[in-house]
Image (spheres, helix red, strand yellow):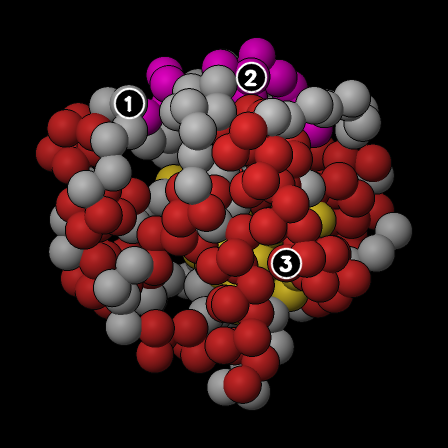
Amino acid sequence: MNKPICLWSCPRNVSTALMYAFAQREDTQVFDEPLYAHYLKVSGAIHPGREKVLQALENDGDKVVYEVILQKSEKLIFHKLMTHFLLGIDTEFLSEVVNIIFIRNPEEIITSYSKVIPNPSMNDIGVKQQYELFLYLERRGIEPIVLDSKYLLKNPELMLSKLCKILDVSFDEKMLEWKKGARKEDGVWAKYWYKNIHNSTGFLPYAKKAITLTGSNAELAEECLPYYKFLTAKSIQL
């Protein structure tokens, strides 16, 4: 039986697209951010649809870990998660799962995130938490996989093939395409965050954009950059 796969992403990455890719596999069951309600309750963060999320999901993070994330299944289990949702969680369970740290250039994260929630903080975007998670796992003798969405979008087939090889599962070409629209696994927050993915049928080509951040957003990007540079150097390369 395979270990559950935990994708520890930052927000405004293509993590939902990656979840959709794994959902195309007949041998895989996917779960969309099962720790979201826990995070909202513990952090007090005000996100779109907050009350609906709290009602839809289990609020006790440790209960989610043992009843959802670590559930036993004959299928491959893939959990899309946000790194900063680990707030107040007993992280002993990380030795029982496969950990993928899914990163993105912080300038791109902040530009996208601030369109929904203005003036994000370090705690909102999770880049430092991803760096700290990598170091924590390394100290515990747990080897994390680091995946940079930039490389995934530049060559989805190659990067998914490499990822599957590391996961010791066969690559399935079905992972490259999905039907347009929502999926049954989508969280109740989908209408606030998933517009682009619902209009897609596959990974969109990577396009480097000219980004100009100002004020606190520029300062946050500058603070995040060393963490991102460290992690992308550790990531699966093209």
Badge 2: residue crowd in 10 Å (few <14, some 14–19, many ≥20): few
Q: Is residue 36 left or right of residue 171?
A: left
Residue that badge 2 annotates:
196
- Spatial distance from mark 2 to mark 1, Cα to Cα? 17 Å
For image coordinates 70% across by 28% down, the residue present is 203
Badge 1: residue crowd in 10 Å (few <14, some 14–19, many ≥20): some
| Earlier-in-chain disc, 2 versus 3 | 2
**Badge 3 amino acid:** Tyr
Residue 165 lies in the magenta-colored region: no
Residue 89 in the image: x percent, y percent? Answer: 27, 66
Residue 104: tell me if it is visible: no
Q: What span is in magenta?
A: 189-203
- Which quadrant of the structure image shows residue 15? top right
Res 227 label: 3
The answer to whether mark 3 and mark 1 are in CB contact below 8 A is no
Res 48 label: 1
Residue 193 lies in the magenta-colored region: yes
Q: Is residue 117 left or right of residue 11?
A: left
